[in-house]
Image: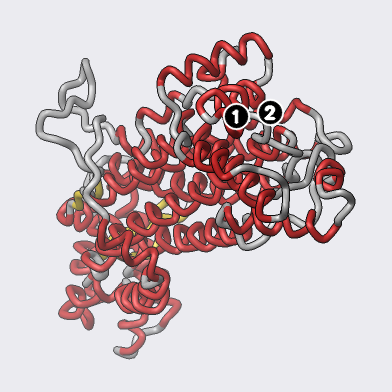
């Protein structure tokens, strides 16, 4: 397989952000390889190896590959059947003074693995910024609807009231945990460094005539030149594939969060209470012209499932790396790692678009509350009767009978809930007839939901988004427009 095909960018990159698509592009990958070879040469020269200045200058001047160099690399790989050596040869053609020292003492994983770690760390940073924007947008929605009563659901059956904003905080809290988990994974990423073919650094020990101190210093210098604070203390030929597990786990977890949010929105769309954005010219169905299908939320669910299962690849790959390495990880990782980041990127951009255009229908929400609230108000009615001197058990039996009669009207006859009308017409409840409107006020059933929203946004969301890199991302974030 030719070089440009071997590292062909996955199809999903078409829909990812430009920066994420570029991160995993062949052009960026091979430029990063050349930067790593340059860093190795700089460090080796600094520690005394006879590498001419001209070699370093030629390498610095040819870090970007031209279309012609891509063609050369493709032909070389077809001939040599080795991607790294094809690019060593190609780099040497445009930096002839360095041709003899490019990749000196290194194994292929010096460039492939170290480059992957660079891409992973950068990709996680991109995702952190995108996630912060989504949290910001959804937080604005929660604040706007902090006090709007809505019917709660447990088991997708009517339950006590909550508010539209309070429900949104449940989504945001999980996104904050994803922010924490991705940040932890990003900050924990180290560098493979300069470790040699089986991780023993034997080739570099030979280059430096048995000087262990210089070999250790070489590892530190290259690590620093490549922008990392530390290198993993021991490796085999590769960095441990367990690192990929630790990276893909928080991305899979993000997928679970996004899937839950999008599923809730799909259910709310069916109830006609909350809908995702829908353009005036958008078509929901080719046959049923009236439909407004939640296509964006469905896309989030679809891609999130893909994101969640990619973690399994990392687990299985890590578990079968025999001894110092086997090559059955390579083809898998070349698909899995870019796909995970590109998919997470698309999930977040789609979710941002949804959150920026959510449509709430208060009258539909109020109507559904009106259908269920009479049943929920029965306890309040009982307590009010007791306060007026009534007997609790007698009141309970009276309201139980009326409730079942009203339920029959709703379930068997398809009529509206007339429980309150029945209470008004029953002389037993006459002492509280004037209080019924107050007893049925939805705001009295939402508890501390509005205050919980305020406290959560102030004490948890704002501090998380106030971190400098995230604050800048939120401030610079632009509205996402998507094709359906």
Quarter placement of the N terminus: top right
The image quadrant that residue 379 belongs to is: bottom left
Q: Is residue 201 above or below residue 437?
A: above
Judge left or right: residue 82 versus residue 34. Answer: right
- Between 305 and 53, the residue placed more toward the observer is 53
Q: Residue at x 62, y 55 (%)?
A: 189
Horizontally, residue 457 falls left or right of residue 328, namely left
Q: Nearer the viewer, residue 302 or 332?
A: 332
Q: CA distance from mark 1 to mark 2?
A: 6 Å
| Residue drawn at x 23%, y 22% as measured from the top left | 285
Observer-nearest residue: 413 or 83?
83
Q: In the figure, 374 relative to 315: above or below?
A: below
The quarter of the image holding the C terminus is top left
Residue pointed to by mark 2 = 330
- Give the percent coordinates (x, y) of residue 57: 50, 42
Q: Which residue is mark 1?
A: 334
User: In the image, which disc is placed on residue 31?
Assistant: none
Are circles 1 and 2 on residues that touch, CB within 8 Å?
A: yes
Q: Is residue 429 above or below residue 251?
A: below
Q: Camera-side residue: 97 or 130? A: 97
Q: Secondary structure at mark 1?
A: helix
Q: Is residue 379 visible?
A: no
What residue is shown at x 57% (from left), y 52% (from top)?
A: 226
Other residues around mark 2 within 10 Å, as few (<14) / some (14–19) / many (≥20)? few
């Amino acid at each position: 397989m030719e070089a440009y095909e071997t590292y062909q960018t996955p199809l999903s990159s078409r829909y990812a952000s430009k920066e994420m698509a570029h991160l995993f592009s062949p052009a960026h990958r091979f430029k990063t390889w050349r930067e790593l070879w340059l860093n190795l040469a700089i460090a080796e020269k600094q520690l005394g190896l006879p590498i001419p200045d001209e070699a370093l200058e030629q390498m610095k001047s040819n870090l970007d590959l031209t279309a012609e160099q891509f063609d050369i690399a493709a032909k070389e790989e077809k001939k040599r059947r080795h991607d790294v050596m094809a690019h060593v040869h190609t780099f040497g053609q445009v930096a002839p003074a360095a041709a003899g020292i490019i990749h000196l003492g290194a194994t292929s994983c010096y460039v492939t693995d170290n480059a992957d770690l660079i891409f992973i760390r950068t990709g996680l940073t991109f995702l952190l910024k995108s996630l912060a924007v989504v949290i910001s947008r959804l937080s604005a929605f929660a604040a706007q609807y902090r006090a709007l009563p809505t019917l709660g659901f447990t088991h997708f059956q009517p339950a006590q009231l909550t508010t539209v904003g309070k429900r949104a905080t449940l989504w945001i809290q999980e996104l904050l945990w994803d922010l924490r988990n991705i940040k932890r994974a990003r900050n924990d990423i180290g560098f493979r460094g300069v470790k040699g073919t089986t991780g023993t650094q034997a080739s570099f020990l030979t280059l430096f005539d048995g000087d262990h101190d210089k070999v250790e210093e070489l590892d530190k210098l290259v690590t620093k030149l490549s922008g990392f604070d530390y290198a993993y203390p021991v490796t085999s030929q590769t960095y441990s594939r367990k690192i990929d597990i630790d990276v893909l786990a928080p991305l899979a977890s993000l997928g679970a969060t996004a899937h839950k949010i999008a599923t809730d929105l799909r259910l709310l769309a069916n109830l006609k209470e909350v809908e995702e954005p829908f353009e005036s010219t958008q078509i929901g169905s080719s046959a049923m012209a009236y439909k407004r299908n939640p296509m964006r939320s469905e896309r989030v669910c679809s891609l999130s499932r893909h994101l969640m299962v990619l973690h399994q690849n990392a687990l299985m790959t890590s578990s079968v790396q025999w001894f110092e390495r086997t090559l059955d990880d390579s083809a898998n990782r070349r698909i899995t790692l870019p796909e995970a980041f590109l998919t997470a990127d698309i999930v977040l951009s789609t979710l941002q678009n949804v959150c920026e255009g959510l449509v709430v229908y208060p009258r539909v929400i109020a109507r559904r509350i009106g259908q269920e609230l009479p049943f929920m108000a029965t306890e309040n009615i009982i307590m009010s009767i007791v306060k007026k001197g009534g007997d609790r058990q007698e009141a309970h039996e009276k309201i139980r009978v009326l409730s079942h009669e009203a339920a029959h009207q709703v379930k068997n006859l398809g009529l509206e809930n007339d429980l309150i009308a029945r209470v008004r017409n029953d002389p037993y409840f006459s002492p509280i007839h004037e209080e019924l409107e107050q007893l049925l006020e939805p705001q009295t059933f939402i508890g501390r939901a509005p205050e919980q929203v305020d406290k959560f946004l102030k004490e948890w969301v704002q501090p998380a988004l106030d971190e400098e890199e995230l604050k800048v991302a939120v401030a610079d974030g632009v509205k996402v427009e998507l094709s359906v």
